[in-house]
Image (cartoon, coloured by chain):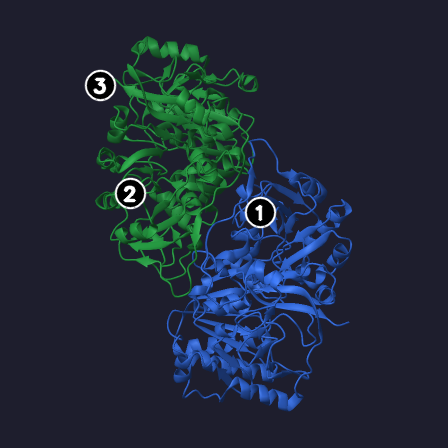
Chain colours: A green, B blue
């Protein structure tokens, strides 16, 4: 058993292959980029096929290959299930599934795993039913969890080589030019899909909205696309995005957000031209509203916001409080509309966003990021993957990417959730190392990472109570008691890759 | 001596390496894309360097490597000379120069060749002084002439591997995000540069307009850029683009254009949603004006225009006669302004435009292309490279690409220019094979390629006199006489690669 820098135990067989986590920037990436195969298309040849089945056949998909999908349609996605059903019906087996993430709606994967169609998975996350099944030992080979930036890195370094990418496109022409801005299943940015299209050997565009050539804007260009298939529906708009993401009215969440805003605006980074990223969770989303008020009052404009984007940030773009938005993923209808109409709301790929192995990701330019957590421990390590029962139900997402890149990383969390402490002695699963986290913000006050003496100095007179993580943990334990340890078996069901490719943790099978 | 399908003699030593031309679509391209090397950039690391020299040093440029530039600044370019001067001063030798093209302003290259700094060149074209010097034997190794699509193919297939690309950018941020739309030296599309940025090992952005992060629109993304250098001036706006390109008033050119428009509008391709490309030459540009009138009258709209773009086509976009423009290169100020402000004027890469080896180039979607020629022979082979004295002075450009892709390819040419016949028995140099050309249009009438019996039928009642190429040639020879044969020596000074990579011709040293 190897032990990584955080003291997490990694079985040798995996440590030997991936290496163990040594620190957030300890790996230097020097490599030749991966690349896809090309078969040229001559004038007069058509890429338009009549069915998913024909596309699978023409793609040359065979047992043992790797396939990918994007998760821009979230809970409204119909593409993954549709394609997997056809693949299963064709009797193809032993595939590696490498989507950018997996949603609840993809529970039919459970059967495809049981039937041997899929024998390996890499994903940002696993949701309820599939996550539970996998935590209970559904798959022989452990799932590899990768962050959004880590997945882009793995693809660019050929650690994931996609044989066939099946990419749902809300708008496409018959030659494959595709975007996510237009169409009945529009989802905004196709930032994750862009990476797959660039590096996969075969790329199949699946659309329910075939438009005249040339389709613009072009998120995925024709010269990366082999085939185009038209289907009735690629996604359910209600599942793809909610209306405008609502700001919470929960008083505790608002208190956390207000504290977070005090931290941000008192920090040395809050000045004309600063940049930030904030997420969708209750209090992380609310921070944007407090920040908006502060920026108006202080007459400060942000140079850019990065994301995962919500409509609220887009309204700040419209208002002129933010100069530019660069966007890998739209979270709500307002964000999708914003990307369609506002030229300063610009689509970027997941590699551009967060890949730690490339020539410079956007997260490296971030001043402030506001993140959430399922658990955070006294070493500031963050878990956004496994629940208090040890079962996989979350997603790595851009958590470790943005927090590594930003100059000031805040984790917002209530002290307890229900009867469960969120601030603990040791998290079940580490997704983001404590070295990436600067300040933890709760409803009762904050804890500054002792690594950041400069911030301790900067926040000396901050009008928010300050604690150590040990103190916050004790306060949580006082209310709900020390959590019972989870009983795991030895068997590893998921490997948690840090964004640099090393293993930061593993998830073990929970005892039935 | 090998002989290719057009009967052109290719010395074995070159035929063995490149293969000989066998027909416009005889090569099927199946390959794994090339890719560049990457050294990751961590948070806090800067790409901004203080000088061209520092960029050359940091890039690791060494004797024997390949460097590239783009030609979007045309006769206004200052980047190539600036970088070459520094490279020469540093004593680096034996480089291969692989720009997308070379202009008159690059005559200082002659000294760099004489001094052994550059010992090999591949380019779309060579202009006056350099072309003449090379035709007179300046270089030991023959120059390789490639079309715009052929260059993209060669780069994607790793036949050209760019070690360092030095890319002038009218607008860039310190992390390398670059576009050509903004800045004092703006040139519009960066379509050629996009290919270099994608596949080169090291990419240096050279700008005179550093803007705050993130610079948008993003033609070249930060994750393809290693270094950024700011200089006083990258280009002279007057040399980069003229005002609006003027329509000719020359009666002969107007007559040719009118004939061409009759051919286009009588063709089966002229209907709602058709597409076309037309160039910048006197009569080819004038065609757009006649076509504009016809489209208004007939209430026909084009789905897209492709190019090399002039302001005239952009005005047709504004008017609604053209739905979309997709653009690798802007030829005048109006086109540059159009790309900046009109979202339906969309930038594409040279590979997207014309690469015959990729998954489908835009030229494959063309209905009509209007081209010019220096010479065209009775087999419809076209020369746009060497003058009547056999000296290199032209550029391959997109000639062979667009004509191979389009359903109807017109070559517009006067019968004679000055005292020189343009329709001849055999062209000095073949750039585009006759199989790609459908109709030759002159001031006295047209000749239809006998290969296109369908067009002969379609144009049976066309109100334009019709001739054979033999007849047109005789009419030219009647006026100016049969041209004297050019006296060449055996030595090959340039290899003419067809877009598929095979040799369609060679250019030999002219006798001094």
Helix, strand or loop status at disc 2 = helix
> Residue beneath label 3, please?
A512
Contact check, label 3 and label 2, Cβ < 8 Å: no
Q: How crowded is mark 3: few (under 14 residues within 10 Å), some or many (20 or more)?
A: few
Residue B477 pos. (x, y %): 63, 88
Task: Classify B55 as above or below A9.
Answer: below
Residue that appears at 34% across and 41% down: A65
Residue that appears at 39% across and 12% down: A425
Q: Answer with the quarter of the image where residue B236 lies.
A: bottom right
> Residue beneath label 1, please?
B200
Same subunit under labels 2 and 1? no
Q: Whole-Å distance between the Cαs marked 3 and 1?
A: 53 Å
Q: Whole-Å distance between the Cαs marked 3 and 2?
A: 29 Å
Residue B158 at least partly seen: yes
Task: Classify A119 as above or below A26.
Answer: below
Contact check, label 3 and label 1, Cβ < 8 Å: no
> Residue beneath label 2, please?
A80
Q: A488 or A382: nearer the eye? A: A488
């Amino acid at each position: 058993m190897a032990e990584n820098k955080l003291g997490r135990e990694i079985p040798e067989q995996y440590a030997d292959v991936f290496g163990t986590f040594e620190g957030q920037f300890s790996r230097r990436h020097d490599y030749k980029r991966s690349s896809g195969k090309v078969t040229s298309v001559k004038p007069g040849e058509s890429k338009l096929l009549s069915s998913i089945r024909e596309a699978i056949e023409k793609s040359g998909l065979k047992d043992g290959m790797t396939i990918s999908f994007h998760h821009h349609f979230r809970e409204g996605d119909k593409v993954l299930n549709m394609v997997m059903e056809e693949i299963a019906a064709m009797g193809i087996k032993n595939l590696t599934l490498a989507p950018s993430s997996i949603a609840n709606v993809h529970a039919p994967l459970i059967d495809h795993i049981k039937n041997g169609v899929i024998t390996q998975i890499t994903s940002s996350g696993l949701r309820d039913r599939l996550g539970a099944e996998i935590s209970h030992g559904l798959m022989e080979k452990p799932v590899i969890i990768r962050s959004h930036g880590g997945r882009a890195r793995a693809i660019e370094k050929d650690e994931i080589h996609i044989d066939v990418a099946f990419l749902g496109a809300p708008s496409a022409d018959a030659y494959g030019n595709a975007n996510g801005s237009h169409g009945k299943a529009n989802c905004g940015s196709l930032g994750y899909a862009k990476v797959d299209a660039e590096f996969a050997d075969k790329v199949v565009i699946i659309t329910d909205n075939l438009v005249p050539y040339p389709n613009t804007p072009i998120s995925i260009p024709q010269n990366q696309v082999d085939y185009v298939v038209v289907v009735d529906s690629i996604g359910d708009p209600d599942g793809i995005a909610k209306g405008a993401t609502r700001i919470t009215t929960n008083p505790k969440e608002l208190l956390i957000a207000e504290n977070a805003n005090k931290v941000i605006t008192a920090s040395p980074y809050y000045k004309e031209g600063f940049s930030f990223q904030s997420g969708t969770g209750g209090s992380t989303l609310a921070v944007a509203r407090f920040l908006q008020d502060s920026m108006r009052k202080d007459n400060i404009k942000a140079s850019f916001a990065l994301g995962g984007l919500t409509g609220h940030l887009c309204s700040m773009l419209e208002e002129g409080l933010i100069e530019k938005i660069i966007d890998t993923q739209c979270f709500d209808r307002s964000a999708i509309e914003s990307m369609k109409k506002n030229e300063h709301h610009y689509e970027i790929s997941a590699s551009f966003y967060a890949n730690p192995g490339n020539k410079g990701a956007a997260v490296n330019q971030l001043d402030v990021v506001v993140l959430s957590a399922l658990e955070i421990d006294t070493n500031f390590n963050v878990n956004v993957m496994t629940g208090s029962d040890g079962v996989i139900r979350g997603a790595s997402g851009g958590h470790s990417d943005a927090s590594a890149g930003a100059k000031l990383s805040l984790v917002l969390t209530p002290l307890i959730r229900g009867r469960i402490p969120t601030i603990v002695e040791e998290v079940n699963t580490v997704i983001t190392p404590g070295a990436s986290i600067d300040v933890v913000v709760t409803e009762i006050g904050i804890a500054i990472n002792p690594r950041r003496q400069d911030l301790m100095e900067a926040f000396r007179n901050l009008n928010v109570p300050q604690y150590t993580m040990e103190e916050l943990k004790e306060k949580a334990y006082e209310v709900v008691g020390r959590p019972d340890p989870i009983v795991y078996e030895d068997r590893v069901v998921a490997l948690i890759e840090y964004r640099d490719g090393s293993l930061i943790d593993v998830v073990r099978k929970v005892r039935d």
